[in-house]
Image (cartoon, rainbow, N blue to C red):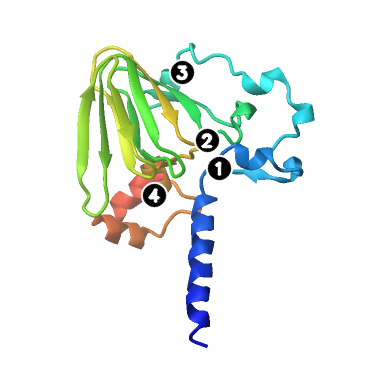
Amino acid sequence: MMKGVPYLVTVVILALAFSLASAYDPSPLALAFSLTCSLLFVNGKFCKDPAYVIASDFFFPGVNIPGNIAANKLGSSVNLVNVDKLPGLNTLGISLARLDFAPYGLNPPHIHPRGTELLVVMEGTLLVGLVTSNPNKLFTKVLNKGDVFVFPIGIIHFHFNIGQTNAVAFAGLSSQNPGLITIANAIFGSNPPINTDVLAKAFQLDKNVVDYLQKQF
């Protein structure tokens, strides 16, 4: 029986490695050899039959148009061009976002669970930051026009316009569908709401404060 243990361990390790590898957008070559393209999907999207692909699948207009920052009480707007808007991104593992900020506008602390973000400032001045875990260390930097900053996958980060004029930035992300978890919205705006006692104890707040925060979302 003991002779079978190394073999079993090897199988388990290979299975884990495969599951981790499949969690990310694979190389497009991995799908190119498939004869059942229409039955495969990557990151939640089905592979389109090449016979039905059209030029518009590779095209998206409008990233030159400023976002509607007035509609957001935080004074920011994000136009994400992912696989939902640009089908040609499917299996390529990339996406793009335009970020617009009013003076002192904020893109609040958030996470991209499936993609690393590479940000370049086009206009204005942004204070950006990320927080690592174990230990919870904050890294911040003031970015001006032409500066670049990277936010690793799954790390809490934010962008804040500290200037008195509008700011514009573009971000490349290493996933066709990087996902977004905005911390405050997820914690205080979940449906159904998280138990007040849980949040009060977790954040060391009075339950009335927690109740107030939940009502804001």
The residue carrying mark 3 is 68
Residue 26 tag number: 1
Mark 4 or mark 3, earlier in chain: 3
Residue 172 tag number: none
Is 113 situated above or below 59?
Answer: below
Q: State the CA–CA distance, disc 2 to disc 3.
A: 28 Å
Whole-percent x, y for residue 209 in the image: 29, 50
Q: Is residue 57 left or right of residue 209?
A: right
Element on which disc 1 rests: loop
Q: State the CA–CA distance, disc 1 to disc 2.
A: 7 Å
Depth check, mark 2 against mark 3: the one in front is 2
Pick the residue in front: 34 or 209.
Answer: 34
Mark 1 or mark 3, earlier in chain: 1
Residue 93 tag number: 2
Is 14 situated above or below 143?
Answer: below
Kind of residue at disc 3: Asn
Kind of residue at disc 2: Gly
The residue carrying mark 4 is 187
Kind of residue at disc 1: Pro
Mark 4 or mark 1, earlier in chain: 1
Mark 1 or mark 2, earlier in chain: 1
Whole-percent x, y for residue 107 in the image: 35, 30
Whether pointer 1 and pointer 3 mark residues with C-beta atoms closer than 8 Å, the reply is: no
Element on which disc 4 rests: helix
Tell me if mark 3 has few (under 14), some (14-19) or many (20+) residues whose alpha carbon lies within 10 angstroms of its own: some
Q: Is residue 116 left or right of residue 146?
A: right
Q: State the CA–CA distance, disc 1 to disc 3.
A: 34 Å
Q: Residue at x 71, y 43 (%)?
A: 34
Element on which disc 3 rests: loop
Q: Residue at x 41, y 19 (%)?
A: 69
Pick the residue in front: 9 or 203.
Answer: 9
